[in-house]
Image (cartoon, rainbow, N blue to C red):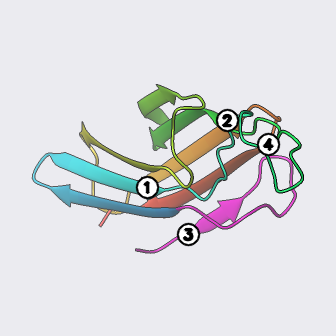
Amino acid sequence: MLILKSIDQKGKIMGSPMRIRAVQSGDITEVKVLIKHDMETGQRKDADGAVVPAHFIRTVVAKCNGRTVFEAETGTSISKDPFISFKFRNGNKGDKVAITWNDNKGDSRTDEVAIT
């Protein structure tokens, strides 16, 4: 796994980079992504009994050389630090796969990796 670039779309440093692996086998590229995010539902209470506000990823988009190869809309039912795996065709070794997530508080993150 090699992370080439870790940026926040707003230009600020945010959480840990995603762990991304993109491996080509024949014509198929398999991508595995581990996203660091608390994924709060808004239904949990803290030690003082106050409701912890909802904070969850709304969308995940993956692009290979600018072409969208994966899109997902998520919600509160996704666990903390979600793992996503998908496959696509027509990727080549060395091509860059960029993963971007956006959450309900307006935060986002983009990380990319080269296909091996």
Looking at the rendered structure, the kind of residue marked 4 is: Asp
Q: Is residue 87 left or right of residue 94?
A: left
Looking at the rendered structure, the kind of residue marked 1 is: Val
Secondary structure state at the residue bearing disc 1: strand
Tell me the distance, in whole angstroms, between the alpha carbons under discs 2 and 4: 16 Å
Earlier along the polypeptide chain: callout 4 or callout 1?
1
Residue on which the image places disc 1: 33
Residue on which the image places disc 2: 41
Looking at the rendered structure, the kind of residue marked 3 is: Leu
Tell me the distance, in whole angstroms, between the alpha carbons under discs 3 and 4: 21 Å
Residue on which the image places disc 3: 4
Q: Is residue 7 magenta?
A: yes
Residue on which the image places disc 4: 107
Callout 2 environment at 10 Å: few (<14), some (14 to 19), or many (20+)?
A: some
Prevailing secondary structure class for the magenta stretch in the rendered image = loop
Q: Position of residue 72 (x, y in %)?
A: 48, 28
Q: Do the residues labelled 2 and 4 touch (CB within 8 Å)?
A: no
Q: Is residue 71 magenta?
A: no
Give the mark toward the camera: 1 or 2: 2
Give the mark toward the camera: 2 or 4: 2
Task: Write the start and end of the magenta stretch as one range.
Answer: 1-18
Quadrant of image for the C terminus: bottom left
64 versus 47 height, above or below: above
